[in-house]
Image: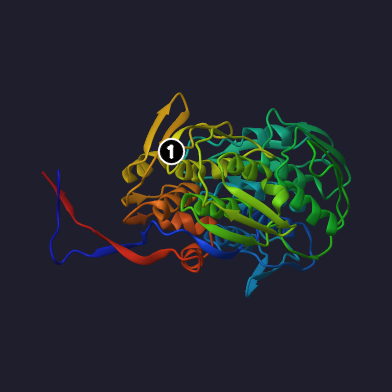
Amino acid sequence: MTHLITPLEPVLREAALSIRGGRPLRGTFHAHTAKNSALYLILAALLTREPVLLRSVPKLSDVSVLLDIVRHVGATARWQGHDLYLHAPQIERCEAPYHLVSQMRASFVALGALLGRCGTARVSMPGGCAFGPRPVDRHIKALAQLGVEVREEGGDFIAVRSRPLQGRAVFEAPTVGGTQNILLASALGEGQVVIDNAALEPEVADLITMLNAMGARISGAGTSTLEVQSVPELHGVIYTPIPDRIEIGTLMLATAATRGQVTLHDVNPEHLRAVIAKLTEAGVEVAIIDQRTLHVDATGPLKAVDVTAVEYPGVPTDLQAPFGAFLATVPGVSNIVDRVYPDRFTHVGELSHTGARLELHDRTLIVSGGKLHGAAMHAADIRAGGALIVAALAAEGESRITGIQFVERGYEALPERLVRLGADIRQEAAALATGTYGD
């Protein structure tokens, strides 16, 4: 089959990044608040009739998708700079349709928020990322344990609360979205709920902190057992999400891959203990300046290390791909395993274009580190895109990365912020000619 192109054919343009690597990152970097927290805090705003103000929310496409859902159900949402004003005096539609939910997995947690506010909810099966199955069966089982009737109809999940949520929800394995779904579903009402084997991630504790500031009664934040005493109503709040540990970790790994020196502000070092420990093991000097500041110095000799991504407080699965890109620059052999999403290796084929020596064997990525060279690569998901940028910054020569719409789902204005650290990055359009196919 050949692709026949004529001069009259329309040309579609996809944004791309051109990165000339081999330049150490140096300077200061101010982190944004956590996208993976802000999404659920936005949903929490649906539980009150009073206004909610979230401060310093990152302007990302994932946030825009969730705001479309919030507006669809009848709430108002408006920006003032990076401050986000939300108000849901009434819910007009207790459902989140496929064309919205299919864009992002996190939107499935709208089920808990709508169930909590309306007593019923209809939400489509979620979508969003390309790496492997991410089933929602744990969410459904936990809701059923609390007396919620859930049925599937035409690709939608319909949940009905015929009585106050009551009892114990036991997760077979910790799930962040599942834990947040139960918290949102049970915060309002008259029941008592215990969540066993709850996710420990800081984003869960952040949701609990905000809900409690709104008048909820939830104890056990940061532990695997959460207790919810439902309350009749919640009030408005002004709240700032936690720092984005994934954005910060990606910048730490980019600094290490380029052998640079960067001071990172607006961070929470406690959320990054496992990342700091693993980078330190590799020879990177990470200094905790204070409770909001880290300094990363990767100018000394580095060595290969093994990395296993697990639930918090371990190395996050969202940093597994960026870790692989960094270790591809380090002499020696490293082994990378992802216990959370064992098939999360969509970046491997693209990363190999840089000369990275990678072998995927029995769900273990074996990385033989060395020099990388510029290459054309395509990002298939958010963190794969972060990994390809890390590799391109370290590689000698020019790289071109397409699929950056995925990067924009999780990193706000990342190219511009990297340029301020000395990176050579240009954003451009990649021409994709359309046409007919012939023999």
Task: Choose between 96 and 384: the one closer to the eye.
Answer: 384
x, y percentage for residue 64?
Answer: 56, 62
Q: Residue at x 63, y 71 (%)?
A: 82
Amino acid found under the numbered disc labelled 1: Pro
x, y percentage for residue 15?
Answer: 37, 62
Task: Choose between 277 and 66: the one closer to the eye.
Answer: 277
Q: Is residue 338 above or below residue 253?
A: above
x, y percentage for residue 329?
Answer: 43, 44
Task: Choose between 313 and 39: the one closer to the eye.
Answer: 313
The picture quadrant where one finds residue 92 is bottom right
x, y percentage for residue 291?
Answer: 75, 57
| In the image, farthest residue toward the top | 362
Q: Residue at x 80, y 39 (%)?
A: 223
Residue labelled with disc 1: 331
Q: Residue at x 74, y 58 (%)?
A: 290
The picture quadrant where one finds residue 60 is bottom right
Q: How is the image coloured?
A: rainbow
Q: Residue at x 50, y 46 (%)?
A: 322
| In the image, farthest residue toward the front | 300
Q: Work out whether residue 120 can be spotted.
A: no
Secondary-structure class at tag 1 = loop
Q: Quadrant of the C terminus?
A: top left
Q: Viewed as shown, does residue 103 lie left or right of 312? A: left
Q: Is residue 402 above or below residue 192?
A: below
